[in-house]
């Protein structure tokens, strides 16, 4: 017992700054950086005032693994080895792991995950803000089983509400801010079953703007707001068959409606007029291909500037929706470039807000079947081949690791997807082998990472995602939590005495 006690005393003594210098490793930059981290953690104090503003960042499909890849990509783009890079949200003092399953799915889609964060309860796959006592696509039962959203709660408190997505603004994650539907696919009237009294998602967005719940909406999905007889500014026809032009209805109630980066730049901010930005017929372009439309960081900045005109504060939901789509495609290049654009938007929000009155939460709705090979030397291009470690140095040796088939392999792979090495044969069976691969091929913008199970679209996975938070009551995040707890932290933050 005495020996154990004295060992503890010795440990404490060695941990003090003065005696730490006696350690042979004390001059190592790793050691001093860790000491600085401890000092910062000791200085961190919870903020317990009421939150004026709440910003919820969601990178769709950006689980712990995808986030790791974005970190390395960002660091390597900045000229480093990648591992040492710190993303904006990774500086936040409060972190937790989040369980993402839905009430009927071990692996969720984005509808119930977004519902969990916006309503405080889990729901079934395929439905948005409808209680799980209802079957998916049961229109009649769904009409009486809707729940109240965080946006509606804070709107009643006098706050403004904004929603941003690089996907269609009627897609699952942004729709969960303002809509209730027995099917996430009912984005315009053509999806609504005959005799069903539920409004489609695009219609619900305009209704929520008219009701004063939604003050700003920016994203894609223009076709769901236009009649099929109308072509948009890019010559693409609308989808609605009810003859309604919801963009004209928005203008009639005084909203500013914009379709491209030029009229977006000319927006009048802070005059309390609703804003509707629809920058593509369907999803907005990937960051790597973006032309003629604002970046996620630019939309974030405009939204904060606009919503900040309300002295009561605001709730802003921001989604990097296309991280998910590029993962589904098995195309890591666009996953990572959209992920970096997401981080840039977070940095802009941090710059424009004060941690004393603004709760910023950064998370994901789910992860994907992405995986990482070893044993790669540091600095191996996250998009490229897994290079051997250099025993005499830090950076990799420049020589690819080889698998048992004698061929190199990439750092990133997928368990399933369009990049499968198994190819359908004439007799409908699957066979194949891995092709030889060069660094140039692997790092091409359109390269699909190698996968095992053949699928036309790579799948989500059910593993945990992370949540990072700073600001009032951010310290309530910790440990491993259910996804719906995020709503309860936000609600507590805006109502705390």
Image (cartoon, grey):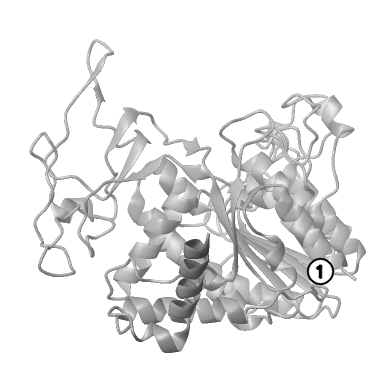
Determine if residue 62 is in view.
yes
Is 324 on the left or on the right of 215, as rendered? left
In-front residue for pair 279/360: 360
Instruction: State whether residue 371 is above or below residue 132.
Output: below
Q: Residues within 10 Å of mark 1 (few under 14, many from 20)?
A: many
Q: Position of residue 5 (x, y in %)?
A: 52, 66
> How many numbered callouts?
1
- Extreme-front residue of the structure: 2
> Residue 218's quadrant in the figure?
bottom right
Q: Position of residue 138 (x, y in %)?
A: 78, 24
Instruction: State whether residue 68 is above or below residue 359.
Output: above
> Residue 34's quadrant in the figure?
bottom left
Determine if residue 417 is in view.
no
Which residue is located at x 26 percent, y 14 percent?
429
- Kindly identify which residue carries mark 1: 160
Is 316 on the left or on the right of 212, as rendered? left
Q: Quadrant of the C terminus?
A: bottom right
- Extreme-bottom residue of the structure: 18
């Amino acid at each position: 017992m005495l020996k154990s006690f004295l060992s503890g005393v010795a440990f404490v003594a060695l941990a003090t700054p003065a005696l730490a210098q006696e350690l042979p490793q004390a001059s190592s930059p790793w050691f001093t950086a860790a000491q600085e981290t401890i000092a910062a953690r000791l200085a961190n104090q919870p903020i317990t005032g009421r939150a004026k503003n709440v910003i919820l960042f969601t990178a769709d499909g950006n689980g712990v693994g995808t986030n790791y890849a974005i970190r390395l990509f960002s660091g390597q783009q900045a000229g480093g080895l990648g591992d040492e890079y710190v993303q904006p949200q990774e500086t936040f003092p409060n972190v937790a792991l989040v369980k993402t399953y839905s009430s009927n799915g071990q692996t969720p889609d984005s509808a119930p995950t977004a519902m969990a964060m916006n309503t405080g309860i889990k729901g079934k796959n395929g439905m948005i803000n409808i209680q799980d006592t209802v079957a998916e696509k049961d229109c009649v039962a769904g009409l009486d089983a809707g729940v109240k959203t965080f946006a509606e709660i804070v709107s009643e408190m006098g706050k403004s509400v904004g929603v941003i997505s690089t996907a269609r603004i009627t897609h699952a994650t942004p729709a969960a801010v303002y809509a209730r539907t027995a099917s996430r696919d009912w984005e315009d009237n053509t999806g609504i079953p005959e005799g069903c009294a539920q409004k489609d998602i695009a219609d619900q967005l305009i209704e929520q703007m008219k009701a004063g719940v939604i003050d700003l909406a920016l994203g894609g999905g223009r076709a769901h707001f236009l009649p099929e007889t109308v072509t948009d500014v890019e010559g693409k026809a609308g989808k609605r068959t009810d003859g309604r032009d919801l963009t004209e209805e928005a203008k009639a109630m005084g909203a500013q409606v914009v379709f491209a980066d030029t009229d977006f730049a000319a927006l009048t901010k802070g005059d309390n007029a609703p804003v509707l930005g629809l920058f593509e017929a369907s999803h907005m372009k990937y960051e790597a291909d973006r032309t003629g439309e604002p970046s996620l960081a630019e939309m974030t900045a405009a939204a904060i500037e606009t919503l900040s005109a309300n002295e009561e504060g605001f709730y802003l939901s921001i989604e990097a929706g296309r991280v998910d789509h590029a993962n589904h495609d098995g195309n890591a290049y666009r996953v990572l470039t959209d992920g970096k654009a997401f981080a840039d938007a977070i940095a802009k929000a941090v710059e424009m807000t004060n941690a004393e009155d603004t709760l910023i939460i950064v998370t994901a709705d789910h992860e994907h079947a992405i995986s990482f090979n070893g044993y790669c030397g540091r600095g191996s291009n996250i998009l490229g081949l897994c290079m051997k470690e250099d025993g005499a140095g830090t950076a990799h040796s420049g020589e690819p690791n080889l698998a048992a088939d004698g061929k190199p392999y990439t750092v990133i792979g997928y368990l399933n997807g369009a990049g499968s090495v198994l190819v359908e044969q004439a007799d409908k069976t699957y066979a194949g082998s891995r092709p030889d691969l060069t660094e140039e091929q692997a790092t091409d913008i359109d390269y699909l990472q190698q996968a095992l199970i053949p699928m036309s679209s790579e799948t989500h996975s059910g593993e945990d995602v992370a949540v990072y938070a700073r600001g009032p009551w951010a310290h309530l995040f910790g440990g491993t939590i259910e996804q719906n707890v995020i709503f309860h932290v936000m609600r507590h933050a805006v109502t705390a005495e």
